[in-house]
Amino acid sequence: MGIMHNIGRLGPKIVQFANGKRLAELPWLLAGVLMSSRIGRSFLVGCGSLVLVLGCAKGQMGGEIGITTDNTDEGGANCKDGPSTMLLPDEEIQSLPFKLSDLIDAIEGQHEASLAWRGNEEASFANIEVTPEAQLTTIHVAVTPLPETGRLVERSEQSSTGDGETLTDEGVHPGCADRVVVDAQVTVQSDNGALDETFSTTFWTSDGLVAHSDITAEPADFGGSFSVDVSAVGDHAQASQTQLQLSLAFGALSGTLGGLVETDNGEVATGAAITYARFPAESACESGFVLPTDAELHADVEQLLGEHTQFDFAWQGEATQRLTVQTTVGAICYNEQDVGYGPAFTARVESHVQLADDTIDGTWPLDAFIIQDEDGGLARVDVQRNSHMARSFAPQEFAQQTGILGVESEADALSFSFGWSVDGTASAVASGELTLLELTMAACDEPLPTDAEEGEGASSPGCRGTDVKELKNAQFVERAE
């Protein structure tokens, strides 16, 4: 079983088919924290959510024999398949740094993963009877690629005008990268008897790290005991768009089996997504794909962070003292969205942070953004504390929860932003910032007056937002030897 070819320093047999640019300053934008680009001394955070779209969702491909698929992506860049060119297995591809043979090697053979069959225990299964019952089991997937079907599919971004006209932009868009595609015979079986069938499907990859295939079929067509009864939902209910999504990344199988439950009484139509199973049952990554712990990138990140642990730290207006940061690297995850800077790797890390006068002595869960150079080598690691609003504490609990002592405040809650960055060059000097924050929680206005005349226009009073005020800030830079 292959794992595609080298992605720089990741280790043997792992491929880079990706469009290579570096992640640059994006991690600080993702964090939403007050790092070195703080704006003023206080600011308002509104009641809504800021969503940063990193790329387009993948479109449906493949499927059971006789099923028509639409490769237009939903949302994001809204990509559409264009012309395709047949490929020989070892043929060089001008627009992509890999061959069809790499994709074939990656998907061919036997794959398996633990599978959580959710069944009726999930709240989303109310009034829906799924067979078999909820349990942990194993899924087995055998893939036989058909090399003679290999092809390069060009892709473009399209958008719709207000009058329904579709416009196609033939320019280069990171979220609409060309795909290498190959058809395959796939046998899917599960140890709980739910799945047992062979399908004709299509595998594709555009980033070079993940191969995908989506198989759409009715529950009964999956060959096992899998069935869905939605009669208790209503007379007009039906289970539809049942799809098995398969992904192969770094030699590991993952995916979901899901679909929709729809109702339509002729006047009102509704639809709700439902997930029947996921695999593997547990993952070290909340999203994305787990990089093997023996991959060279994992070792490189650990080494880089281990080489930069001693800093000169000073609260604004105060004397400098030593800060020690010792970091343990957990799972590294590949997040498939193309942000325009190449592969996006993140990691869960844990840093023990201690100040010389012991006013800071805590172990903090943090996130690391791993940036590669054009050759796939480790260019930089940005470590930061995300979600400072969600991860806040009552003032009386702040010291115990964070290990940061001596903070007095009458605010509703206290939090902090923390982050540091180090380049992968031999002469790199790491630096970072710690900011203590006071949070005054959102206060919604009083309801509209009850004596307002019926029919009188008025807008919702809403909330004024949560006030986040900088209480104290410190910069730190790596100590000179």
Image (spheres, rainbow, N blue to C red):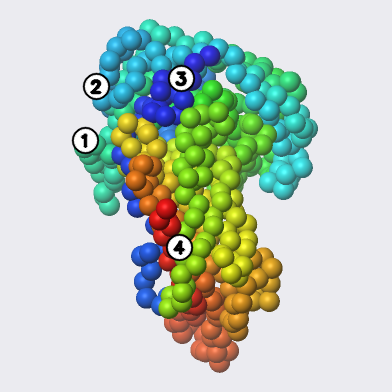
Residue 459 pos. (x, y %):
45, 79
In the picture of the structure, the residue carrying the numbered disc 3 is 13
- The kind of residue on which mark 4 rests is Asp
Residue 382 drawn at (x, y percent): 43, 50
Q: Nearer the viewer, residue 66 or 144?
A: 144
Q: Amino acid at mark 3?
A: Lys
In contact (CB < 8 Å): disc 4 and disc 3: no
Q: CA distance from mark 4 to mark 1?
A: 51 Å
Query: Which one is in front, 352 or 339?
Result: 352
Q: Residue furthest bottom?
A: 451
At label 2, counting other C-alpha atoms closer than 10 Å, the crowd grade (few under 14, some 14-19, many 20 or more) is few
Q: Are marks 4 and 1 in contact (CB under 8 Å)?
A: no
Q: Quadrant of residue 5?
A: top left
Mark 4 or 2, closer to the camera: 4
Q: In this figure, which residue is indicated by the disc labeled 4? A: 312
| Label 4 Cα crowd, 10 Å radius (few <14 / some 14-19 / many 20+) | some
Upstream in the sequence, badge 1 or badge 3?
A: 3
Residue 406 picture quarter: bottom right
Task: Establish if 350 lies above or below 201.
Answer: below
Tag 1 secondary structure:
loop
Residue at point 61%, 39% (across, down): 284
Q: Position of residue 169 (x, y in %)?
A: 22, 39
In the image shown, does 365 or 336 lie closer to the viewer?
A: 365
Residue at the extreme front: 481
- The residue that mark 2 highlights is 94
Q: How many marks?
A: 4
- Residue at 50% x, 52% y: name it: 309
Is residue 185 depicted above or below 459 in this figure?
above
Which residue is under mark 1?
170
For marks 4 and 3 on the same chain, the one whose residue lies earlier in the sequence: 3
